[in-house]
Amino acid sequence: MQLKEINITKKILVSEEFENFIPNDLKEEYNFELTGDFRHSIGSILDENERNILFSVIIIGSTEYRDIYKLMNLLDYSRIYYQIVIIDMEEKLDISTLDRLYHISDIIVTDMPVSKKKFIIDKSFSIIKKHFQNEQKKRWYYNKLIDSQNDQDDLINIGQALSAEKDIDKLLRLILSLSKKMTGADAGSIYLVEEDENGKKRLRFKYSHTFSREIPLEEFTMDLNKNSISGYVAVTGEVLNIPNAYEIDAMAPYSFNPYFDKENSYISRSMLVVPMKNHIDQIIGVIQLLNSKEDLKSRTHGNEAFTVMLRSEEDFDRYVVTFDEKYNNLLQAIAGQAAIALENGRLISQIQKQFEEFVKASVSAIESRDPATSGHSFRVAEICTAIANEINDINYGSYAMTKFSETDLKELEFAALLHDFGKVYIDLNIFRKAKKLYPRDLENLKLRLDYLYRFIELKYASEIQNILKSGMPAGSDEKIRELENAKNSIIKRIGEIKEDLINLNEPTVSDFEPMELLESILQELGKFECRDLTGSPIEVITDENILNLSTKRGSLNPVERNEIESHVTETYKFVSKIPWPPEYKNIPEIALRHHEKLDGTGYPDGLKGRDSISLQSRIMAIADIYDALTAKDRPYKKSVPLDRVLCILKEEAANSKVDPDIVELFINNRVYEKISMP
């Protein structure tokens, strides 16, 4: 409580029964009050004004002492300072009954001279005043101690807060907010030193905030020189603690520009401006604080910065004080921590950006191997992020309490970008395989069938030629007709088999077992002889042809499908070797599980149920399916219409393949409309 806010009332309270013992000349000199109810008399004085402090000499008889002492202990001792004077006839006075002598200044007897009584009263008020001053001094030191402790706590908290925040914009706001809170400043700004393309340094007004009013300000740059207050600090590295910006010495190298005040009906008085120096003592910016509202004499909570509002000119006169000199060093400590935090933030941001660009460049390089699937990983990452953001926005359903932080979103994005990285270890031809047989294998099979066709023709032609050369014995015409019919039947069947094999090569989902047709064909072909020029038998349909053509679903045989499925484990092996920071430690696992199914039919480990597959992987599974179906035509499939894609996702969810809640969210919230088209 500041002295200028205190109203001190000095009063002598006298018990009514001793009115005649107070001489009239003393009554005229001092403020006396006769009372039979000390509680009421004291209470009325204190209740007149909450800032009232009572200095009171209490004159009572010795028999009243104990009651008065008990009463005084029940009152607000911070607002009443008193001394007790015992008055009694000498022959009735019993000193042995008095204890707790600290508040008894003296004893007055009836035959005591007036001058002695006056002396005792004056001495009592002197003791009261000294006691009050001591209490004020103790409170002042106590407040200073609490203030220093708060400052120390603030420095620790500021250090922890600055070290935890990595986002540059958030850091700037945090630095200014904490600086204002510690110093009780009403307003403040942060300037950053930057270089233009020509290497010339300039000072950028980056961020500002005022507690007492909303003042929208835009970024701007200014020349880095000593003319302005912030420029002077940025150039010299000196700390400026200015009591009144409007009273700066005319000889000072810097000057105050009142433009801000005029535009916003504000009054910039006290200012504290400190440089932000990094670890190599370079000035990277300036913290400028305005109008300290801190009352060091009464500070108990340190919230003046945002609880005391400066609305009128009277408020500025009443509340604004000069920044305490201790903040010259304290704010430099904050500025030093802030500078290091900013530098670290910039470095981390730069590293993150470089790493992100490296990941994207790597993914682009891998996807360039197959133009047909180019952009798939980027689109899957975009879809995953869109779904996660949609989950963040909902407040109902299974994921109402699930929230993805910025770090979680970045982790999911990286995992999605790298989810197919393992395909770099797989034969590219497998990805481009449009039919069950590779084109060269189909051509070779057709050539062998054509060779068989010609071999059969030549074989029968040779037999007919031998008959003709033998002179056409009896029955030759019939034999030739039989040979011709047999030849025509066989070569016709070879043509039919060729068509069956070409049709069987199509990667459609068939209801019959391809192997049954193959076995029938193999059995038929086994009846036909086919040899090469050396006389060695020719295998028309190879074991590899059989393996591929017997595939019932799609174009990949079991060996190729296993190799394709191995891309997730190859991805995991590669991504696990990257030294991810702790917040990204789940990236390898998320990427590994994007082909797992809720019913346990997925790969690589056949995990079953939601609890065994992370939410991020379940999101990626849906994003991967959606993009694979909607992507532009590929060698092995056509692009599927959107309505059909959504139906397929619903079917997959109904069959416990993918997460039904995510599919429902994806469709009902039309997330697919919030992403780039493939």
Image (cartoon, rainbow, N blue to C red):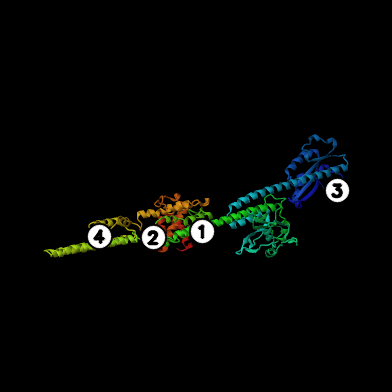
Q: Amino acid at mark 4?
A: Leu
Disc 2 versus disc 3: distance between alpha carbons? 113 Å
- Return the x and y of residue 17 as percentages of the image width and height: 82, 42
Dot 1, how many residues are within 10 Å of its Cα: few (below 14), some (14-19), or many (20+)? few
N-terminal of the two: label 1 or label 4?
A: 1
Q: Amino acid at mark 1?
A: Glu
Q: Secondary structure at mark 4?
A: loop
State if disc 4 and disc 1 touch (CB < 8 Å): no
Residue 533 image label: 4
Q: Which is in the foreground here, disc 4 or disc 3?
A: 4
- Return the x and y of residue 378 as percentages of the image width and height: 47, 60
Q: Is residue 443 rendered to the left or right of residue 76?
A: left
Q: Is residue 370 visible?
A: yes
Disc 4 versus disc 2: distance between alpha carbons? 35 Å
N-terminal of the two: label 1 or label 3?
A: 3
State if disc 3 and disc 1 touch (CB < 8 Å): no
Q: Which residue is under mark 2? A: 432
Q: Secondary structure at mark 3?
A: helix
Dot 3, how many residues are within 10 Å of its Cα: few (below 14), some (14-19), or many (20+)? few
Q: How many marks?
A: 4
Q: Which residue is under mark 1? A: 357
